Image: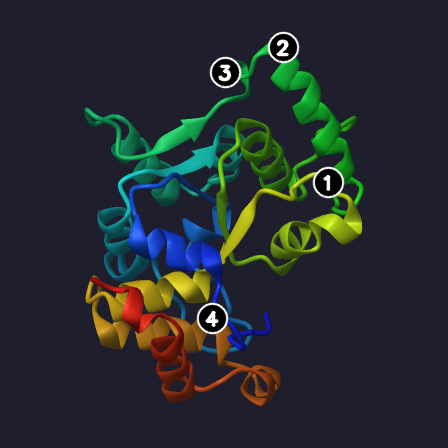
Amino acid sequence: MKIDISSSNPALISIIEDPAQVITLDANFLIPPYRKRLTKRGVKFEQFREIWLDPIFGAFPNLAIHEAVYEELVDVSPQAFVDEKYRVEPPGIIIHRDSSLTAVESVLRDSIEEKIAFLTDYDPMLDNKDDRGEVKSLSFIAVKGLLYFAAHDNNAIQLIEKSEEWSTGLDNVQAIKMFELIYYLYGNDLADKTAMKMLYKYQYYLTDREKSTNPNWGDFSSTMDNLYASYFK
């Protein structure tokens, strides 16, 4: 994924100023990145939880996933993590359920879902697994008027950022990228700084192509400081 930090993201500024807003997560925020065909170094779930999940859930009190994303968490560890968060009182995660939609909202959701699905590998008629989580998530939050979708998948981000051009019906949804939340934790002293640097490099600065298109950690962090540091309290 190519990193663009040529300008600030209003969505990131908004959650810096008010981290209690609802942020809906794509599945890739909950599953350890797997790039072992590119490097011998893998990330086990226990490590991913320590350096990423626990800090993220500690920083934002109203994180959410759609029920379709929960179903994607077929590995025992991510599902168990979500179950653990959901079963406490009050729940530590919000689960969006289509059954909560009114009849009017369901009709609107189906319309948006059809527009989005056309641009993905998901077929609502087949209800196949490919891209199902992001399509269901985006159509739900668009209908409910929820603003933020956090993703690492480039296609999901483009569905939002090119909503007008592609007529996806997601004009009011805003994308938050994983690298932006890596910086949020780093810049706000909410996670181990060395771990954030490592996670950034693993996700965005691993291959020769990534090194030719994406900024190294030093350039990335200093540019992000210039864009966002003044918003931290």
- Image coords of residue 209 (percent x, y): 62, 84
SS for dot 1: helix
Mark 4 or 2, nearer chain start: 2
Q: Is residue 185 left or right of residue 73?
A: left
Q: Amino acid at mark 3?
A: Ser
SS for dot 4: helix
Q: Is residue 41 visible?
A: no
- Alpha-carbon span between mark 1 and mark 2: 20 Å
Mark 3 closeness class: few <14, some 14–19, many ≥20 residues within 10 Å: few
Q: Is residue 145 above or below residue 196?
A: above
Mark 2 closeness class: few <14, some 14–19, many ≥20 residues within 10 Å: few
Q: Is residue 34 above or below residue 225?
A: above
Q: Amino acid at mark 1?
A: Ile
Q: In this figure, which residue is indicated by the disc labeled 4?
A: 203
Quadrant of the rendered image containing residue 92: top left
Q: In this figure, which residue is indicated by the disc labeled 2?
A: 103
